[in-house]
Image (cartoon, rainbow, N blue to C red):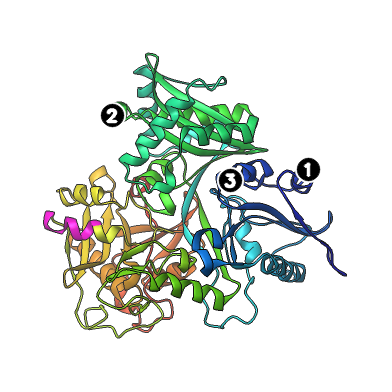
Amino acid sequence: MSGATIRVDVVRPDDPAWEGWLEHIPCDVFHSGEYHTYSEGSGEGQAYLLVVGDTDRGLAWPYLLRDLEREYGPDGRGLADVVSVYGYPGPLAWGCNPGEPFLTQAWREVQAVWRSQGAITAFTRFHPLLGNASLASGMLIEGAEASAPDPIVANGRTVSVDLTLGYDGARAAYGRDLRREVDRAYRQGLETSVDTEWTELGTFARLYNDTMLRLRASDFYLFQEADFWRLREALADHLHLLVTRLEGVVVSAGLFTNWDKIMEWFLVGTDSAYAALSPSKPLVDFAIGWAIDRGAEVLHLGGGRGGAQDSLLWFKGRFSPRRHTFHTGRWILDAVAAADLTAARRARLEPGMQLDPHYFPLYRAPVLEAPGQPDGEAEPGPDRRQGVTADGSGGDEPIQIRRVTPDDVDALGELLENIDGTYFQPHPMTREEAARIGALRGRDIFLIGRVGDRGVAYGMLRGWDEGYTVASLGIGIRRDSEHRGYARAMMTALHEIARQSGANRIRLRVHPNNTRAASLYQLYGYREAGFDRHETLMILDLGAPSQASVPESSDAGPLPFLSLDAGSAD
């Protein structure tokens, strides 16, 4: 395809032009024609690479086009939607920077092609390492309401290992006690190697699926052994199988991809019978050294399941302090058609059921049990600020804050699963972790804030039990309870408990991108004290004015997330 002023090409994965366009652009395996061939063979849609521009300046956007008639019958006739492959793809650009007029023009061409293919919505995952979400800044749909939400959404955090440090340097950045645990695993006889003959792929498939079932992952994360053989055929030398054995028995195995200087943890599984040995730790440790030997500069471990701040993310985070924000993009190209398709699905729902309102696009949303209000009628959200009561809470009922006890475990577990994990990842945000916290009886403080029977705020002062003199503070607020003053109430409680405990100061860490949070903490009297693990370290002198000086109408507002790591306390 071509236009008068700008060139537009639409390329299929079997066309050599696909790899030709990507040859000199920093990218990953998830952008390749080979990987898109695999995804197309899995029935995920027809694969395309849309290129706008020329060799000097351009935008390349790989995507899958799904035919809606096949899934929705007559309601979806003539319609399609745009999605991305599993992993971290997103658009790529060269010869231009985010915000330049060329990208605005290119975005118009992208929309025109998608609409010509019948697409009514578009969804993409971006690459946390390449930072290509910045390319989509300002990519709005013309004519959309000004109040429409930002199409670029932060969906959690991922972890990467800096391989340019060398093997010893990478290991030096491991979290507390991890090196000792890995070395102990080696002494116990665990050995990892690369299965160049792929003799253990069937074993890997069994271990991986057993792991996903054990973790109660959705069917989306389950694969057949045949899927892995197709992936192997598609990616060839860009896919590798690493296996960890104990006395000849495979106890853990993982698939890793490589593309240029980027190595990716793709999928890993462990035999539950050997879980006490933590065989995945020496597996990842081996992968780091092996990737360095292959010339890779970064090993991207990825994030939690579905972007969640779960035990998987916590495990990966022990191997490196480096964090990246994972974004997705979502656009409605034809609001009328999308609404009609959604209405048709709703009309077929059983009584008492609704479409998951947080899913995009809504017409593909999973079906859930409806709450006490009609489907589609949302509770007051963050933009509907409510008055703050005398104790700092919002709404009709005051917040009640107390130390976590075994009686709070259920409420805390449910609360942890509903806190935004973009910047707040102090530990696995799971019900199992809530049970562990409820049983603690040390000096560290863990608080829960309730409104009625519902947990809305979580706070902690952590580090004293590990022997540190300065504790780290952290707070997390339930997603649907943000901007109601609960963060201020929790911080006030934590500051007072710290004083009662005889502390002279406390500390916290905040991500540089979390500027609104940093502004609030400065209002409380926190001062910057350098950097720790790529985040800003802030200290509060408890003898200085703090929360009493924070105006209730502060534009900074209560912030829902705060990063901390008591293991690095002074």
Callout 1 environment at 10 Å: few (<14), some (14 to 19), or many (20+)?
few
Disc 3 and disc 2: Cα gap in Å?
A: 35 Å
First reached walking from the N terminus: tag 2 or tag 1 = 1
Q: Percent from the top left, x then y, of residue 137?
A: 63, 68
Q: Which residue is mark 1?
A: 16
Asked whether the viewer can see residue 570, the reply is: no
Q: Which residue is mark 3?
A: 39
Residue placed furthest toward the top:
247
Asked if 157 appears above or below 233 in the picture, the reply is below
Q: Residue at the spot x=64%, y=70% of the render?
A: 139
Q: Which residue is mark 2?
A: 276
Q: Secondary structure at mark 3?
A: helix
Amino acid type of the residue that numbered disc 3 sits on in the rendered structure: Ser
Amino acid type of the residue that numbered disc 2 sits on in the rendered structure: Ala
Q: Percent from the top left, x then y, of residue 229?
A: 55, 31
First reached walking from the N terminus: tag 3 or tag 1 = 1
Residue interval drawn in magenta: 406-413
Quadrant, the N terminus: bottom right
Callout 3 environment at 10 Å: few (<14), some (14 to 19), or many (20+)?
many
How many numbered circles are shown? 3
Asked if 89 appears above or below 140 in the picture, the reply is above
Q: Could you say which is closer to the camera, residue 538 or residue 190?
A: 190
Disc 3 and disc 1: Cα gap in Å?
A: 18 Å
